[in-house]
Amino acid sequence: MQRLLALVPIVIFVALSTGLGLSLSNDPRKLPSMLIDKPTPAFRLASLDDGDGFSSDDLKGKIALLNVFASWCPGCRVEHPTLMGLAERSGVPIYGISWKDDRASGALWLKANRSPYVRVGDDASGRLGIDLGVTGVPETFVIDRSGRIRFRYAGPITDEVWEGTFAPLLAELRSEPQ
Amino acid sequence: MKRHRRAAVRRIAIVLGSLLTLSAASMAVTPDEVLKDPKLEARARAISQNLRCLVCQNQSIDDSDAELAHDLRVLLRERLTAGDTDEQAIGFMVARYGSFVLLKPPLQGDTLLLWFGPALLLIVAAIGFGRYLRRHAGAGTDASAPLAAEEQKRLDAILSKRRPA
């Protein structure tokens, strides 16, 4: 009994150091989204390109990606080819929100690089971004058929991220009853 | 002597002056953000000093020069002007960014360990130390007990060896 008791500090020490050691690999920039499983906030934005506006009603009834980007954001440039590929192949409509960017530069950038978006709204003030809990760009939300946000990914989507994270989730969402 | 003093005064003035400009430069709230109503502005300042800037993470939005911090300051002031109470305005931020946005963590389920962990550790340590003390106090009374005949003989032998008569 006494011997076992003597082991207690060692056990506590080992538990503490593994716990603390593991949390070293936590990225403090990766914050959980408050909107998971909550309905997408209602919004109505002017269109960034020449198309119609973009509102939360456009997202109704389908599984969709909502990608927050800006022409000034290097990560968005990294992500752009992946999004173009996804728009062609994945079968999931991608909607865009141009966040804290002036309309002309955003539109010019999309025109020069081609647009992966079905619709793209202009959130120059960043207010919708705040409603979505956006802290930086790019951020991508997965929205289910009932209009709920199911997942938020902060950072550029790469092919690995798509295959490892998004693809399984989308398969799951598609198998959910309508 | 007089010249020395004047030089010293000048030096102090330079130091003070540069300190003043420094503190002015580190002020993030720009004049166009400030509300006309000083009471509302004071409330906004007090709230924003306890809201974390999500970009820099270790500064309040009151301190931070980040653009998002600016947007949040303006938004907070709009909410207060629209008649939000302090709690409503803070709740608005927490609903969007989580309780991480509060620089002082609230007392709730997932922060219990954070709030009471140190006290818990102290209690465990006190119990452990108490047991240790009791055990060793017990050993002390044993030491003062008279020696057994065998032990006395060994002690005598050792002493006589060290100090030959």
Image (cartoon, grey):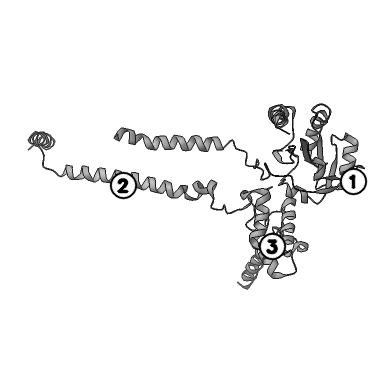
- Callout 3 secondary element: loop
Q: Label 3: chain?
A: B
**Residue found at the very far front of the displayed protein:** A178
For marks 3 and 2, the one nearer the N-term is: 3
Q: Count residues near mark 2 (Cα–Cα under 10 Å), then give few for <14, some for 14-19, many for 20+.
A: few
Residue assigned mark 2: B130
Residue A9 drawn at (x, y percent): 39, 38
Question: Closer to us: mark 3 or mark 2?
Answer: 3
- Going by the numbered disc 1, the residue's amino acid type is Ala
Instruction: Judge whether B35 appears above or below B124 on screen.
Output: below
Q: Residue at x 64, y 69 (%)?
A: B9
Horizontally, residue B24 falls left or right of residue B121, namely right
Residue assigned mark 1: A104
- Going by the numbered disc 2, the residue's amino acid type is Gly
- Callout 2 secondary element: helix
- Tag count: 3
Confirm whether circles 2 and 1 share one chain.
Answer: no
Horizontally, residue B145 falls left or right of residue B107, namely left
Question: Closer to us: mark 3 or mark 1?
Answer: 3
Which label was assigned to residue B84?
3
Residue B90 in which image quadrant:
bottom right
Horizontally, residue B142 falls left or right of residue B134, namely left
Residues at marks 2 and 1 touching, judged by CB atoms closer than 8 Å:
no
Q: Label 2: chain?
A: B
Residue B100 drawn at (x, y percent): 62, 49
Residue A91 in which image quadrant:
top right
Residues at marks 3 and 1 touching, judged by CB atoms closer than 8 Å:
no
Marks 2 and 1 sit apart, C-alpha to C-alpha, by 72 Å
In which quadrant is the C terminus of chain A drawn?
top right
